[in-house]
Amino acid sequence: MSVGVAIGLVLGIGGTLTVSSIDFYGARSPFEGALEACDLTDRPTAVLGDDGRSLDLDHRGEGDAAGLTTDQLHCVLDELEAPDRVISRMQRTRALDGHQTDEWSGVEASWIYHPDTGLDVLLTLL
């Protein structure tokens, strides 16, 4: 192996390691993008946390004066490309089922349902 090839390999590997370890500050999280696409920014029922790594969604229940509509909740899940199986599990959750979880493409969803308070969903980036 020539010296030029060896140096090229070292620089190539080093460059790859450097680029992959860069933290792009200021990059928008997928949750922020979903809230913007669904026109839900600055809503007390759709709250970003952990520097954009979590999203708390409060769906409107029968006893709630405020909360996300079903269409708004679906919009966020669609923007995040939640698979049909996750949406189906959320739709079929009953109060007696308790706390549920699932994940897809680097997102963990946990939720609980009660008719009075609606479907409360916490999304977290893995």
Image (cartoon, rainbow, N blue to C red):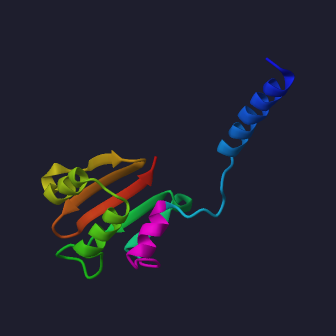
Position of residue 61 relative to residue 83, above or below, is: below
Residues drawn in magenta: 30-43
Residue at 26% over, 82% down: 65
In-image side of 79 versus 24 (left or right)? left
35 vs 54, nearest the viewer: 35
Label total for image: 0
The reply to whether residue 49 is in sight is yes
12 vs 35, nearest the viewer: 12
In-image side of 70 versus 108 (left or right)? left
| Magenta-colored stretch includes residue 37 | yes
Residue at 23% over, 57% down: 87
Position of residue 124 relative to residue 56, above or below, is: above
Residue at 19% over, 52% down: 89
Q: Name which quarter of the figure residue 14 lies in.
A: top right
Residue that sits furthest to the bottom in the current view: 65
Position of residue 19 relative to residue 64, above or below, is: above
Q: Quadrant of the N terminus?
A: top right
**Residue 48 coordinates in the image, percent (x, y):** 47, 66
